Image (cartoon, grey):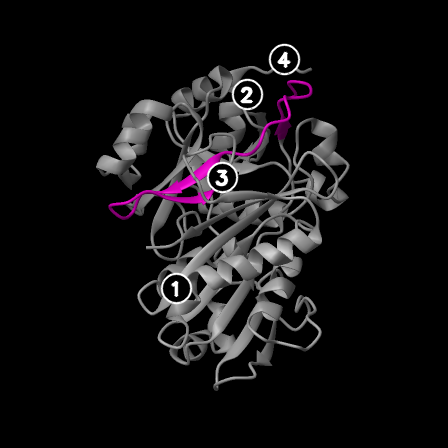
Amino acid sequence: MSTVKIDDVIRILDKGGLVIYPTETMYGIGADATNSAAIKKLNRYKKRPAGKPYSIATSGKTMAEGYVFINKVAANIYKSLLPGPVTVVSHGKHNVAPGVESEAGTLGIRIPDHKLVIDIIKKFGRPITSTSANASYKKRPYKISDVLDNISESQKKLIDLIIDSGELPHKDPSTVVDTTCDDLTVLRQGEILFNNKNEILSRNEEETKNFAKELWQKYEIHFGRRAFVFALTGEMGSGKTVFTKGLAKAVGVTDLITSPTFNLQISYKLQTGHQSLVHIDTWRMSSPSEIYDLDFGENISECSIIVIEWADKIVDEIKKYTEEAVVIWVQLTFGKRENERLIRWMVAK
């Protein structure tokens, strides 16, 4: 483990450098959230497409108020759960570097439950980025080797300082909650579990497919009057395409369902009516706005059934259509046993 002087960390952050640091969940990588050059450098390190925002870490609610508008819903979370592994999304005040806020102007705030990180941010006087130290969609970093063994030499050269605290406890990432509306919306369940009765444990692929069928039957009364968007999130191999296969069978698609990773979208005509099941994979999208190149708005207007894998990459685009479509968020995470998947779902309002 390394011994690091806070003044050394501050000097690097001031110069637009990148610092890997420990948190109560996993290792993060920090850059000055107000420095455009630092954010561009972070984008190169993360190999992150344009349009995907960053959360920021602040030393407390007072600092956060300089960067976001905190409503009553958010204030309750700050009071009861922070510091801690929760990211609170609010409307931003546009006081961070371009690319940190979402394209819709929202911003996630983290107040880590880690004294060293809080001390660094307090002395720095500005927020730093709060994003995992791994490159996008790589292994969760619980120890420094998890980071270094899974990035290229060019990425390693972008790191200016590593604060090594040894292997961290293997915890889930922070829970992400959207407080921009009157009701709290859980965008990602993490270490802190908000009350959610909408969850099941699938023990194999067949059960995941059957759940997709049951979920469709629960809401199909709206079919034909509104579009459906099944917004799927989860790590590689968690079962997003398996869920889609079950849904496709439930709505009458007889074609073979394959992942549209390379061509982004595949459409399947339903046997009844003029609607389609549209299967989208955002993995290779460089910007959320690319969803409109796939006739997303037109498919909504035609009351299609749209399944989006890696939907967390285009959250703000999906939120624009909650009036026209039944938007169902489905999160798939790995269970304790090899074939188990914990599936949580929520209907957006």
Q: Amino acid at mark 3?
A: Gln
Q: Which residues are magenta?
A: 161-189
Picture coordinates of residue 137 (x, y %)? 64, 47
Is residue 270 one of those drawn in magenta? no
Three-letter code for the amino acid on which mark 2 is drawn: Asp
Which residue has dot 3 on it? 189
| Circles 4, 3 touching at the beta carbon (< 8 Å) | no
Which residue carries the number 2 mark?
8
Q: Earlier in the sequence, mark 2 or mark 3?
A: 2
Identify the mark nearer the N-term, 4 or 3: 4
User: Looking at the image, is mark 2 or mark 4 earlier in the sequence?
Assistant: 4
Q: Residue sitting at 76 percent across and 43 percent down? A: 153
> Is 174 drawn above or below residue 321 in the view shown?
above
**Is 282 in front, or is 308?**
308
What is the crowding at mark 4: few (fewer than 14 residues within 10 Å), some, or many (at least 20)?
few
Identify the mark at residue 326; answer none if there is no mark. Answer: 1
Q: Please identify the quarter of the rendering in which residue 93 is found.
A: top left
Would you say residue 166 sits in the magenta stretch?
yes
Where is mark 4, residue-wise?
3
